[in-house]
């Protein structure tokens, strides 16, 4: 929930210790005290989208849109870039899975097709594992549709194509993605 930041994790642990007054710290305590990083919230959004859970995905989107910034700023500065990053990492995971490889044993010529940033092979192992797990439930054609939905939302929010409100545009994008990856589709 701290976006991989050790210093932020230490701050949150200190808050939890003060909150619980030496009682064992439970999940409910973490949920009550720890403010999730944008990276964590985006990952939860991606996880909900990748598993075709529109209600959970819309809930995460709402949390991101109400986390302090104006919706337009949150969309263009955080949500779309971070969501795009995660989808590109899922694409790389799908490529590796289709080749029967992991980042650690993939041939250099396959890894050379990945962009410099984001690059799944350069992510910490725990992130690689999470992304590979999420990528196992989604196909390359489904990811292509998700990337198109992301590009359409980006263009709409920048005024390049007709759009609705920021929230409606993002909700439509998320629902398109969820519909695309819904199990059994």
Image (cartoon, rainbow, N blue to C red):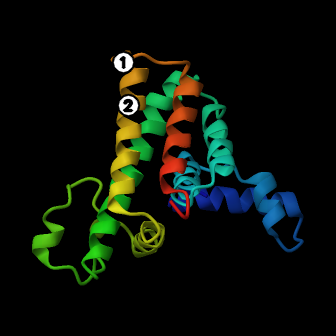
Query: x, y (%) of residue 69?
Result: 58, 27
Instruction: Name the one closer to the observer, 41 or 160.
Output: 160
Q: CA distance from mark 1 to mark 2?
A: 8 Å
User: Where residue 19 is drawn, which disc sits there?
Assistant: none
What residue is drawn where x is 35% and y is 25%?
155
- Tell me if label 1 and label 2 are in contact, CB under 8 Å: yes
> From what the image shows, is residue 10 above or below residue 33?
below
> Of helix, strand and loop, which one carries label 2?
helix
Badge 1 density bin: few <14, some 14–19, many ≥20, Cα 10 Å:
few
What residue is drawn where x is 83% and y is 59%?
18
Task: Note whether residue 161 is visible.
Answer: yes
Query: x, y (%) of residue 177?
Result: 49, 46
Given the current orientation, which residue lies at the most extreme left position?
A: 109
Residue that label 2 marks: 152
What residue is drawn where x is 30% and y is 79%?
102
Task: Note whether residue 120 is visible.
Answer: no
Residue 148 located left or right of residue 172: left
| Residue 19: quadrant of the picture | bottom right
Quadrant in which the N terminus is drawn: bottom right
Instruction: Name the one closer to the observer, 179 or 47.
Output: 179
Residue that label 1 marks: 161
């Amino acid at each position: 929930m701290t976006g991989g930041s050790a210093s932020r994790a230490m701050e949150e642990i200190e808050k939890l210790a003060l909150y619980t007054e030496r009682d064992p710290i439970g999940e409910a305590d973490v949920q009550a005290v720890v403010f999730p990083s944008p990276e964590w919230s985006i990952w939860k959004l991606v996880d909900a989208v990748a598993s075709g859970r529109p209600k959970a995905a819309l809930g995460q989107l709402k949390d991101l849109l109400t986390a302090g910034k104006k919706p337009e700023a949150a969309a263009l500065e955080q949500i779309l870039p971070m969501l795009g990053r995660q989808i590109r990492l899922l694409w790389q995971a799908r490529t590796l899975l289709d080749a029967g490889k992991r980042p650690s044993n993939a041939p250099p010529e396959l890894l050379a097709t990945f962009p410099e940033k984001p690059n799944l092979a350069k992510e910490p192992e725990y992130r690689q594992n999470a992304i590979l797990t999420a990528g196992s439930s989604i196909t390359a054609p489904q990811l292509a549709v998700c990337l198109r939905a992301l590009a359409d939302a980006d263009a709409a929010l920048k005024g390049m194509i007709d759009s609705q409100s920021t929230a409606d545009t993002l909700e439509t994008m998320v629902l398109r993605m969820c519909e695309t990856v819904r199990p059994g589709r």
